[in-house]
């Protein structure tokens, strides 16, 4: 077909118009199922990282700047906290994860929700029973040196994925801080002014001075 | 060329990966495991067939000088439709392949087939061509993914057959080139006999 300015403009206009119409239609059809799928994912992750609970943690969630905290109760008693948080320190961008804590701060389980790490290397952080998760589960971050062994900490890094592993540790640390901050706040309400996150900052700096 | 040949030429004679060497970005990038390679192949197969059909339908109405932007709009729309549908109805598959789906837009096989075949042939032949090339692409990506996963991770489709890590190099980018190079040698050796 011969090209003239008129028919070129007209054809492209019609094609883009139809394309945007189709995309709009597909978007409106899939919008709801996508939301349902994402909610199902959060629910599944909660069930994975928390001990057995009988409430709906999504109802009483607390949102802070960098984390969402879900509280799980069983028969009215708090059995754990799940903290959803993220870090930008990954090898190729953001890593989002959900960390489940028992009320005393011990890590119950961890699940990575989203990441774009190198497939076959950093992506191993999502596999069950990987080195990182094994280093964390059943431990309390307060008793751990929160860095990978290469940096003098207690955490086993994934083979050939030190940067991804550092990011993982960073995200767990953020989750722990967020939980402490939340618990600290409820302490402020009832007792005095000191928060527990300040303690960790100091401790961390001391650790840095030793090196 | 009969209809059957239109379909089968994509598998060996005009295999997009081993003969035409097109679409190297997704080929080398996604084949870190057999399942990733296969998923990428199937997603490409879908987009390629759909875009071939649409383009062969509208080919007579597109002025020659704006055909490339017109094709790209069609292909990009197909990819977005695919991405939204996967997100909504097969979230588990979207988890593993999500980051690679937008890459399909820049896969030059799709634009290549639109330009070389769909814009010159009827709807049925174009659909067959898309299916054939798509199957060829899926097969070669699965083979490449399997080889890299076996050497790099000691597993096939996620099933471990040796303990430990394997040769990490093959999971990384250089390993992709090495594995592809040797597969090309084998492929050429085998097809040379057929000729």
Image (cartoon, coloured by chain):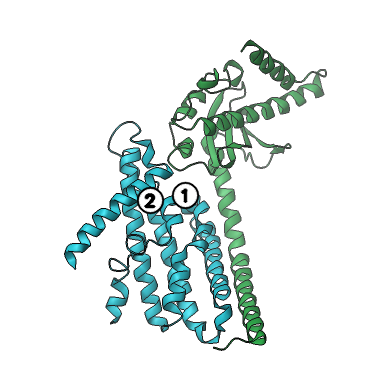
Chain colours: A green, B cyan
Does residue B80 sit above or below B115 in this rendering?
above
Q: Where's residue A42, x and y in %?
A: 58, 44
Q: Is residue B46 visible?
A: yes
Does residue A117 sit above or below B5 in this rendering?
above
Query: What secondary structure is marked by label 1?
Result: helix
Residue denoted by label 2 = B35
Query: What secondary structure is marked by label 2?
Result: helix
The outermost residue toward the bottom is: A2
The disc placed on residue B96 is 1
Q: Where's residue B168, x and y in %?
A: 38, 36
- The residue positioned 58% from the left and 57% from the top of the image is A34
Q: In which quadrant is the C terminus of chain B drawn?
A: bottom left
Looking at this view, is A197 or B141 the one in front? B141
Q: In which quadrant is the N terminus of chain B drawn?
A: bottom left
- The residue positioned 38% from the left and 48% from the top of the image is B177
* Label 1, residues with CA under 10 Å away: few <14, some 14-19, many ≥20: some
- Discs 1, 2 touching: Cβ within 8 Å: yes
Does residue A87 sit above or below B87 in this rendering?
above
Q: Chain of mark 2?
A: B
* Label 2, residues with CA under 10 Å away: few <14, some 14-19, many ≥20: many
Q: Is residue B113 left or right of residue A110?
A: left
Looking at this view, is B19 or A205 the one in front? B19
Q: Is residue B42 left or right of residue A37?
A: left
Q: Where's residue A200, x and y in %?
A: 69, 19
Does residue B168 sit above or below B12 in this rendering?
above
């Amino acid at each position: 077909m011969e090209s003239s300015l008129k028919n070129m403009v007209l054809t492209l206009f019609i094609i883009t118009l139809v394309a945007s119409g189709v995309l709009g239609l597909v978007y409106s059809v899939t919008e709801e199922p996508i939301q349902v799928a994402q909610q199902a994912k959060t629910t599944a992750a909660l069930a994975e990282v928390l001990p057995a609970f009988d409430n709906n943690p999504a109802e009483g969630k607390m949102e802070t700047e960098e984390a969402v905290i879900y509280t799980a109760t069983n028969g009215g008693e708090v059995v754990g906290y799940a903290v959803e948080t993220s870090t930008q320190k990954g090898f190729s961008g953001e890593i989002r994860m959900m960390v489940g804590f028992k009320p005393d701060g011990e890590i119950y389980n961890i699940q990575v929700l989203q990441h774009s790490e190198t497939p076959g290397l950093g992506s191993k952080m999502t596999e069950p029973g990987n080195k990182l998760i094994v280093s964390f589960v059943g431990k309390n971050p307060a008793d751990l040196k929160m860095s990978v062994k290469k940096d003098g900490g207690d955490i086993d890094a994934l083979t050939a994925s030190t940067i991804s592993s550092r990011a993982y540790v960073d995200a767990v640390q953020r989750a722990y801080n967020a939980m402490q901050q939340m618990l600290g706040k409820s302490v402020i309400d009832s007792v005095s002014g000191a928060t527990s996150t300040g303690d960790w900052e100091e401790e961390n700096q001391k650790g840095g001075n030793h090196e | 060329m009969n209809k059957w040949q239109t379909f089968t030429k994509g598998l060996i004679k005009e295999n997009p990966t081993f003969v035409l060497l097109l679409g190297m970005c997704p080929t080398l990038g996604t084949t870190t495991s057999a399942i990733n390679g296969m998923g990428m192949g199937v997603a490409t197969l879908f987009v390629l067939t759909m875009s071939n059909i649409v383009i062969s339908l509208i080919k007579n109405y597109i002025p020659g000088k704006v055909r490339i932007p017109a094709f790209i709009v069609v292909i990009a729309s197909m990819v977005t439709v695919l991405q939204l549908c996967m997100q909504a109805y097969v979230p588990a598959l979207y988890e593993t392949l999500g980051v690679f789906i937008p890459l399909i837009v820049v896969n030059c096989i799709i634009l290549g087939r639109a330009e070389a075949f769909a814009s010159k042939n009827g709807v049925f032949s174009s659909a067959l061509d898309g299916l054939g090339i798509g199957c060829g692409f899926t097969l070669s990506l699965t083979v490449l993914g399997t080889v890299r996963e076996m050497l790099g991770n000691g597993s096939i489709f996620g099933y471990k057959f040796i303990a430990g890590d394997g040769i990490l190099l093959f999971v990384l980018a250089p390993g992709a080139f090495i594995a592809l190079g040797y597969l090309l040698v084998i492929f050429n050796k085998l097809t040379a006999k057929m000729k």
